[in-house]
Amino acid sequence: MLFQGKTHKFGSDVNTDYIISGKYKFKTLDMKELAKHVMEDLDPDFYNKVTPGDFIVAGTNFGCGSSREQAPLAIKYANISAVLAKSFARIFYRNAINTGLPVVECDTDMIEPGDDIEVDLAAGVIRNKTKGVEIPVKPLPSVMIKILNDGGLAAHFKQYGGFNFD
Protein backbone atom coordinates (compact mmCIF):
# COMPACT_ATOMS: atom_id res chain seq x y z
CA MET A 1 0.00 0.00 0.00
CA LEU A 2 1.57 3.21 -1.23
CA PHE A 3 -0.01 6.64 -0.74
CA GLN A 4 1.15 10.11 -1.70
CA GLY A 5 -0.19 13.56 -0.87
CA LYS A 6 -0.01 16.70 1.23
CA THR A 7 -0.37 16.86 4.99
CA HIS A 8 -2.93 18.61 7.16
CA LYS A 9 -1.67 18.67 10.74
CA PHE A 10 -3.62 18.80 13.97
CA GLY A 11 -2.62 18.42 17.61
CA SER A 12 -3.24 15.77 20.23
CA ASP A 13 -6.54 14.52 21.65
CA VAL A 14 -8.55 15.15 18.49
CA ASN A 15 -11.85 13.60 19.51
CA THR A 16 -14.51 12.15 17.26
CA ASP A 17 -16.71 15.22 17.76
CA TYR A 18 -13.93 17.35 16.25
CA ILE A 19 -13.61 14.87 13.40
CA ILE A 20 -17.34 15.04 12.65
CA SER A 21 -19.56 17.17 14.85
CA GLY A 22 -22.59 15.61 16.48
CA LYS A 23 -24.76 18.26 14.86
CA TYR A 24 -24.17 16.45 11.56
CA LYS A 25 -23.69 12.79 12.43
CA PHE A 26 -27.18 12.50 13.86
CA LYS A 27 -28.88 14.16 10.86
CA THR A 28 -27.72 11.96 8.00
CA LEU A 29 -26.04 8.68 7.16
CA ASP A 30 -24.91 10.03 3.78
CA MET A 31 -21.13 9.78 4.09
CA LYS A 32 -20.52 12.13 1.14
CA GLU A 33 -22.51 14.78 2.99
CA LEU A 34 -20.76 14.12 6.30
CA ALA A 35 -17.37 14.31 4.55
CA LYS A 36 -18.03 17.97 3.74
CA HIS A 37 -17.93 18.69 7.48
CA VAL A 38 -14.84 16.69 8.50
CA MET A 39 -12.60 18.58 10.93
CA GLU A 40 -14.57 21.80 10.47
CA ASP A 41 -14.62 22.61 14.20
CA LEU A 42 -10.81 22.73 14.10
CA ASP A 43 -10.48 24.14 10.56
CA PRO A 44 -13.72 25.46 9.03
CA ASP A 45 -12.26 25.33 5.50
CA PHE A 46 -10.65 21.89 5.84
CA TYR A 47 -12.81 20.07 3.28
CA ASN A 48 -12.05 22.71 0.62
CA LYS A 49 -8.30 22.44 1.25
CA VAL A 50 -8.14 18.67 0.78
CA THR A 51 -6.93 17.15 -2.45
CA PRO A 52 -7.72 13.45 -2.94
CA GLY A 53 -4.91 11.42 -1.39
CA ASP A 54 -3.96 13.95 1.30
CA PHE A 55 -3.22 12.95 4.89
CA ILE A 56 -4.39 13.97 8.33
CA VAL A 57 -1.43 14.12 10.71
CA ALA A 58 -1.85 14.41 14.48
CA GLY A 59 -0.23 13.97 17.85
CA THR A 60 -1.37 11.47 20.46
CA ASN A 61 -4.78 9.93 21.16
CA PHE A 62 -6.35 10.70 17.77
CA GLY A 63 -10.02 9.65 17.63
CA CYS A 64 -10.75 9.68 21.35
CA GLY A 65 -14.36 10.08 22.40
CA SER A 66 -17.38 8.24 21.09
CA SER A 67 -17.02 4.95 19.26
CA ARG A 68 -19.24 5.75 16.30
CA GLU A 69 -18.04 4.62 12.88
CA GLN A 70 -19.02 7.94 11.29
CA ALA A 71 -15.68 9.52 12.24
CA PRO A 72 -13.35 7.23 10.22
CA LEU A 73 -15.95 6.89 7.44
CA ALA A 74 -16.30 10.66 7.07
CA ILE A 75 -12.51 10.97 6.85
CA LYS A 76 -12.38 8.23 4.21
CA TYR A 77 -15.18 9.86 2.17
CA ALA A 78 -13.32 13.19 2.34
CA ASN A 79 -10.68 11.46 0.16
CA ILE A 80 -8.04 11.34 2.90
CA SER A 81 -5.73 8.43 2.10
CA ALA A 82 -4.58 7.78 5.69
CA VAL A 83 -4.34 9.24 9.16
CA LEU A 84 -0.86 9.43 10.72
CA ALA A 85 -0.57 9.95 14.47
CA LYS A 86 1.67 9.16 17.41
CA SER A 87 -1.17 7.12 18.88
CA PHE A 88 -4.86 6.41 18.35
CA ALA A 89 -7.79 5.76 20.63
CA ARG A 90 -8.30 1.99 20.47
CA ILE A 91 -11.89 2.00 19.27
CA PHE A 92 -11.20 4.60 16.58
CA TYR A 93 -8.20 2.56 15.40
CA ARG A 94 -10.26 -0.62 14.99
CA ASN A 95 -13.17 1.25 13.40
CA ALA A 96 -10.76 2.83 10.92
CA ILE A 97 -9.31 -0.53 9.84
CA ASN A 98 -12.79 -2.08 9.72
CA THR A 99 -14.06 0.72 7.47
CA GLY A 100 -11.00 0.62 5.20
CA LEU A 101 -9.23 3.78 6.40
CA PRO A 102 -5.47 3.26 6.87
CA VAL A 103 -4.15 4.50 10.22
CA VAL A 104 -0.41 4.72 10.82
CA GLU A 105 1.33 5.06 14.17
CA CYS A 106 4.54 7.03 13.81
CA ASP A 107 6.53 9.99 15.08
CA THR A 108 4.80 13.00 13.53
CA ASP A 109 7.24 15.63 14.84
CA MET A 110 9.11 15.83 11.51
CA ILE A 111 5.93 16.41 9.51
CA GLU A 112 4.61 19.95 9.05
CA PRO A 113 1.37 21.19 7.48
CA GLY A 114 1.61 21.13 3.69
CA ASP A 115 4.54 18.71 3.49
CA ASP A 116 4.52 16.42 0.46
CA ILE A 117 4.85 12.87 1.77
CA GLU A 118 4.71 9.30 0.59
CA VAL A 119 3.54 6.53 2.91
CA ASP A 120 4.75 3.05 2.01
CA LEU A 121 3.05 0.62 4.38
CA ALA A 122 4.74 -2.42 2.82
CA ALA A 123 8.20 -0.93 3.34
CA GLY A 124 7.28 0.52 6.74
CA VAL A 125 8.37 4.05 5.95
CA ILE A 126 7.10 7.58 5.41
CA ARG A 127 9.16 9.63 2.99
CA ASN A 128 8.86 13.34 3.67
CA LYS A 129 9.75 14.67 0.22
CA THR A 130 9.58 18.28 1.40
CA LYS A 131 12.24 17.74 4.08
CA GLY A 132 14.14 14.85 2.49
CA VAL A 133 13.75 12.58 5.54
CA GLU A 134 12.41 9.09 6.12
CA ILE A 135 10.32 8.22 9.15
CA PRO A 136 9.90 4.58 10.18
CA VAL A 137 6.35 3.46 10.87
CA LYS A 138 4.92 0.82 13.13
CA PRO A 139 3.99 -1.90 10.64
CA LEU A 140 0.42 -3.09 10.39
CA PRO A 141 -0.19 -6.81 10.82
CA SER A 142 -0.80 -8.63 7.53
CA VAL A 143 -4.42 -9.34 8.52
CA MET A 144 -5.07 -5.59 8.77
CA ILE A 145 -3.38 -4.91 5.44
CA LYS A 146 -5.60 -7.58 3.85
CA ILE A 147 -8.74 -5.96 5.33
CA LEU A 148 -7.62 -2.51 4.13
CA ASN A 149 -6.83 -3.82 0.64
CA ASP A 150 -10.30 -5.35 0.49
CA GLY A 151 -11.93 -2.01 1.39
CA GLY A 152 -12.74 -2.78 5.02
CA LEU A 153 -14.08 -5.66 7.07
CA ALA A 154 -17.60 -5.70 5.59
CA ALA A 155 -16.19 -5.72 2.04
CA HIS A 156 -13.78 -8.49 3.05
CA PHE A 157 -16.63 -10.62 4.44
CA LYS A 158 -18.76 -9.93 1.39
CA GLN A 159 -15.95 -11.01 -0.92
CA TYR A 160 -14.95 -14.16 0.99
CA GLY A 161 -18.01 -15.07 3.04
CA GLY A 162 -15.95 -14.74 6.23
CA PHE A 163 -12.31 -14.32 7.19
CA ASN A 164 -9.82 -15.24 4.47
CA PHE A 165 -6.18 -14.35 4.99
CA ASP A 166 -4.45 -16.66 2.54
Image (cartoon, rainbow, N blue to C red):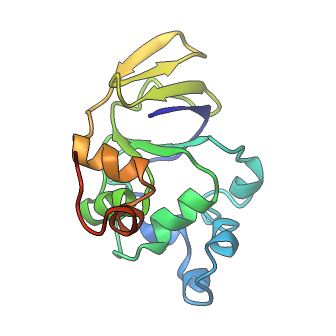
Near-viewer residue (151 or 15): 151
The answer to whether 83 appears left or right of 153 in the picture is: right
Q: Is residue 156 above or below residue 106?
A: below
Residues 52 and 37: in front is: 52
Q: Quadrant of residue 62?
A: bottom left
In this picture, is 6 found above or below 145? Answer: above
Residue found 65% across the figure and 64% down from its top:
40
Between residue 22 and residue 102, name the one nearer to us: 102
Residue name at image x 61 percent, y 26 percent: 115
Q: Is residue 30 above or below residue 98?
A: below
Image quarter where the C terminus lies is top left
Q: Locate residue 21, reporting x and y percent.
A: 56, 75
Residue furthest out toward the top:
132
Task: Look at 33% across and 33% down and name the residue there.
Answer: 106
x and y percent of residue 32 in the render?
67, 70
Q: Position of residue 100 (x, y in %)?
A: 43, 56
Q: Residue furthest bottom?
A: 27
**Is 116 on the left or on the right of 48, as rendered?**
left
Q: Residue at x 35, y 71 (%)?
A: 65
Report whether 25 appears left or right of 60.
Answer: right
**Res 63 seen here:** no
Residue 108 screen position, x and y as percent: 41, 32
Residue 152 at least partly seen: yes
Residue 76 relative to residue 140: left or right: right
